[in-house]
Every structure is written in structure tokens, then in C-alpha cells.
Image (cartoon, grey):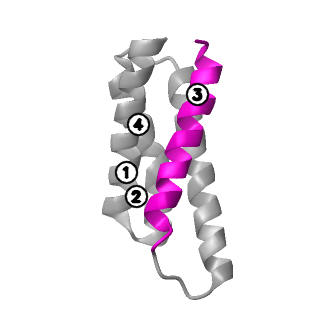
Amino acid sequence: MSSVTLGLICGLVFGLIDVAVMAPMKFEDKRRKSEAISAAFIERFMLGFLIPNVSLDMHQAISGALLGLGLSVPTAIITRAYLPIIGIGASGGLVIGFITHAVV
């Protein structure tokens, strides 16, 4: 499987998992909820897409965890929800890194 195809699959799955985690959350109104869920999906989709397609000189799992951690920090700072956003980003990046190492 090509790294682009794997990235599309991982991005879609990671994005949908994050949407499922956010769906039961309460927001001020429907517009804010749809904005937050859309932004979360796009961020996690791009993480899932980038990890299989970025080659750093280290194990893909470590690379994935670093990308997940680093790319989640800005959103965590903006929302002040540090642990859930950074935790899901880093752990999802780690898992996608292991999948990438096994498949590509």
C-alpha cells in the first residue's frame, strides 16, 4: 500500500474517532459545535495523513507521537483543554506510527 493511501485511510479514521469523542460534548449553540467538530476533524485528518508521509530519521511510532504532540499543542493552547487534545494527538500519532511501520 502506498503511503498516500495509508495516510488517507489513517486520516479519515483518526478524524472520525475524534468526531465521535466530541459528539456528546455540550456547546453554547449548534454553530459552535459544528465549527469545533469540523476543526477537530480537519486537524486529526491531517495528522493521520502526514504521519505516514513524513520521513524523519527515527522509528515511525516516535515520529508519529512527536508530530501528534507538536501539531496538537496550538489547539490545546487556544482551547485551554491541554490533556485531552494533546493526549489524543500524541497517542493517535503513536498508533498511526506503528501502523505505518508495519504496513509501509
Mark 1: amino acid? Ile
Q: Amino acid at mark 3?
A: Gly
| Disc 2 crowd, CA 10 A, few/some/many (<14, 14-19, 20+) | many
How busy is the neighbourhood of tag 1: few (under 14 within 10 Å), some, or many (20 plus)? some
Q: Amino acid at mark 2?
A: Ile
Residue at coordinates 56% horizontally, 88% vertically from top-left?
Answer: 28
Q: Which residues are magenta?
A: 1-24
Query: Which residue corresponds to mark 4?
Result: 93
Residue 40, picture quadrant: bottom right
Front residue of 76/94: it is 94
Q: Which mark is residue 85?
A: 2
Prevailing secondary structure class for the magenta stretch in the rendered image: helix
Compared to 100, does 96 lie above or below? below
From what the image shows, is residue 23 above or below residue 59? below
Residue 88, numbered circle: 1
Report the mark closest to the observer, 4 or 3. Answer: 3
Q: Please give the label number shown on residue 7.
A: 3
Dot 2: element:
helix
Sequence-wise, the earlier of marks 3 and 1 is 3
- Residue at 36%, 16% (x, y): give it: 58
Instruction: Assess whether mark 4 and mark 2 are in contact (beta carbons under 8 angstroms).
Output: no
- Marks 3 and 1, Cα distance to the nearest angstrom? 17 Å
Residue contact between numbered discs 4 and 1, judged by CB atoms under 8 Å: no
**Residue 4 relative to residue 66: left or right:** right
